[in-house]
Image: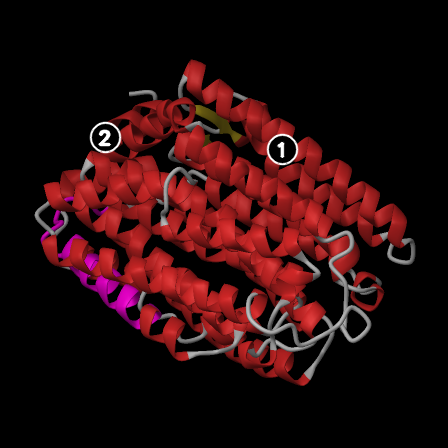
Amino acid sequence: MNNLIVLPIVLPIMTGIILIFFSKHIVVQRWLSLISLLAFIGIASSIVQQVYTEGIQTLYMGGWLPPFGIVFVADMFASLLVLTSGIVALSCLWFSFRGIGLDREKYYYYPFFQFLLTGVSGSFLTGDIFNLFVFFEVMLISSYALIVLGATKIQLRETIKYLVVNIVSSALFVASVAYLYAITGTLNMADLSVRVAEVGQTGLLNVVALMFLIVFSLKAGLFLYFWLPGSYSAPPTSIAAIFAGLLTKVGIYALFRTFTLIFYHQPEVTHQIIGWMAGATMILGAIGAIAFSDVRQVLAYNVVIAVGFIVFGLAAHTTAAVEGAIFYLINDMIIKALLFLLGGAMIGIAGTSHLQKMGGLIKYHPVLGWMFFIAAIALAGVPPLSGFIGKLLIVQGGLTAEMYWLVGISLATSLIVLYSIMKVFMHGFWGETKLSPKEEKGSDKGLLAPCAVLVFLSFALGLGADFFYPYIEIAAETLMDPTIYIQAVLKE
């Protein structure tokens, strides 16, 4: 039993509640939020190191042993994602101090930010599937409030679409949980794995597995991503960045957890369908990325491509592919948040998100321009930056699994990712300078330091891959061998 693992859930929710009482004191809210997130990162780092040295950590709430009580489980996969979430959230929060505006800060922006982080970390750490639903809802309700904060016309329109999609997926989630409980008599994930293995994953259980696949695909933007580009383009920069960095990743986490721990017995059915969906997601995302000339739309479609690429690692289901997917998932959380922050700074300076109306920003903003360039090549997987290692491992795993067609699609879409991001760089930063400093609509003052943290992390992940690899290896080992997770939770 380790009480520490519940703190990444308790700390942000308590901070959010306290912040409500300081709604009129913006400076106090900023400092409390910042201190809370620094403490969050310290706790998450400690959990990662404990899991590394002592193995999977568990906490049985109220002393009730599984499968009857609520259990929180910190394996290496969940712990690494909690830590990365804290770092991404810190950068987005820091960016908010200059980028969100007083009007939004006064209307509970910081409390909702903390509640969103509660939902994200709770989803990663919960050990039963009903509480996964509960933390999903905490995260989604917070995101509804954040996406509509400011009440512009485009925000209201996209909020309705986002709301309807998530209400439908949540209803389907509840139905899936109910069917699963009716068949197995348990909701604890480790116990579910044992029960499904005992009765065999055929017939009804395959139908339930596909229901979960639809739910998590809607939340991750896997093939069913039609709501994502608009929803991620509507809110202000720091909110769009935290969405791009964290929200779809929770859906991806749920896909990995359920289809490596519970529904892994018939890969010729489930994983084959996941593979087709991953391939289609990469192709359709690539078409969107090259079709649009709007900075935010291009970045949003790149989120879609990355979802397909990471889930390709799950479909291949080899050790190398899963290691690569974990590595690339962590890289993508960092780089997507970074690109949305930098893209937001570009839009703020140019006063438009349309590429044809930008140009030559690098003349007066060289640091912003070169940061964007570094993020672009990291996303495309150019060595020695962090995207390269993950892509190499996923492709290697895909070849081992003889999924040559998915390897081909992933390599082709990598080139399109590079083309689409370089299109933003060339149109935005290169060419004729269209605005003098006096004509610019905004400034990058105070916005680059939080972005620099993420750029540094991208370099650290790439150049220090040997240091991080043992952590990734342990995370992948748990996903590839469900008995490690089961024994840690059920103590069998």
| Residue 41 badge | 1
Q: Residue at x 49, y 36 (%)?
A: 459
Furthest-front residue in view? 432
Q: Residues within 10 Å of mark 2 (few under 14, many from 20)?
A: few
Give the number of callouts.
2
Dot 1 lies on which element? helix
Side of 370 where 21 appears, left or right: right
Q: Residue at x 32, y 46 (%)?
A: 256
Q: Residues within 10 Å of mark 1 (few under 14, many from 20)?
A: many
- Of labels 2 and 1, the one closer to you: 1
Residue 181 visible in the current orientation: no
Chief secondary structure of the magenta span? Answer: helix
Residue that mark 2 sits on: 481
Furthest-top residue in view? 53
Task: Find residue 78 and report its image quarter.
Answer: top left
Residue 277 visible in the current orientation: yes
Residue at mark 2 to residue at mark 1: CA–CA distance: 28 Å
Image location of residue 485, percent across then percent down: 32, 29
Magenta span covers which residues?
A: 263-285
Quarter placement of the C terminus: top left
The mark that comes first in sequence, 2 or 1, is 1
| Residue 328 badge | none
Dot 2 lies on which element? loop
Q: Is residue 268 found inside the magenta-colored segment of the image?
A: yes
Hey, what amino acid is under mark 2? Asp
